[in-house]
Image (cartoon, rainbow, N blue to C red):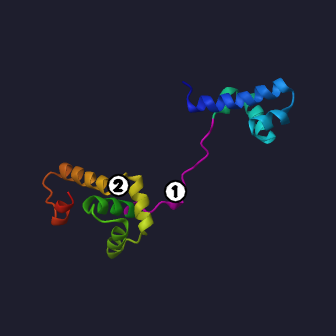
Amino acid sequence: MQTVQEKIISNKVGLLNLAQELQNISKACRMMGTTRDTFYRYRDALADGGIEALQQKNRRKPNLKNRVDERVEKAVVEMATLQPQFGQVRASNELRKQEIFISPAGVRSIWLRHDLATFKRRLVALEEHVSRSGGVVLTEAQVIAL
């Protein structure tokens, strides 16, 4: 069974081999559904670095400018853990009362990063918090939610 990387490499090498076999780069690119520019990039990469150079590289860099402040993120996670019944809009409104300004979509993004996006996940986080803390007394709303 081939891995994804091996399949990608075999397609790229297949294009290069087809072009060599046909002695026509344009025709090979048309048959494989790629551009000639792509063919030349593959050829140059193979010449420079061998087969390993044909591996797919992840060019995506995290955009840290889009992240909220660590204090805000910690407050959102704490709110989700202690009040799992709150939705993203209610959590956003409650945090605004504490002078922490974040949109409901921002709350949801943080929940997704911390695997708290669903009510069930937030309940599991509350249970873990209670088991770690030991003598924590739950509020009536938390007991009802559990």
Quadrant of the rendered image containing residue 50: top right
At horizontal 59% and vertical 32% (from top left) the residue drawn is: 5
Circle nearer the N terminus (2, 1): 1
With 18 as the anchor, is 65 left or right in this view?
Answer: left
Q: Position of residue 88 (x, y in %)?
A: 37, 65
Quadrant of the rendered image containing residue 103: bottom left
Task: Assess whether residue 63 is covered by the magenta stretch.
Answer: yes
Query: Start and end of the magenta stretch?
Result: 56-71
Rendered position, 3 above or below 118: above
Quadrant of the rendered image containing residue 14: top right
Query: Given the current orientation, which residue lies at the most extreme front position?
Result: 31
Q: Position of residue 78 (x, y in %)?
A: 30, 60
Task: Assess whether residue 113 is covered by the magenta stretch.
Answer: no
The number of callouts visible is 2
Q: Residues within 10 Å of mark 1 (few under 14, many from 20)?
A: few
With 45 as the anchor, is 122 left or right in this view?
Answer: left
Q: Name the front one of labels 2 and 1.
A: 2
* Quadrant housing the N terminus: top right
Mark pair 2, 1: CA separation: 21 Å
Q: Return the mark for residue 56.
A: none
Q: Is 94 or 70 nearer to us in this picture?
A: 94
Look at the magenta stretch and give its main secondary structure.
Answer: loop
Rendered position, 33 above or below 94: above
Which residue position is annotated with label 2? 116
Q: Position of residue 23 (x, y in %)?
A: 87, 27
Which residue position is annotated with label 1? 64
Element type at mark 2: loop
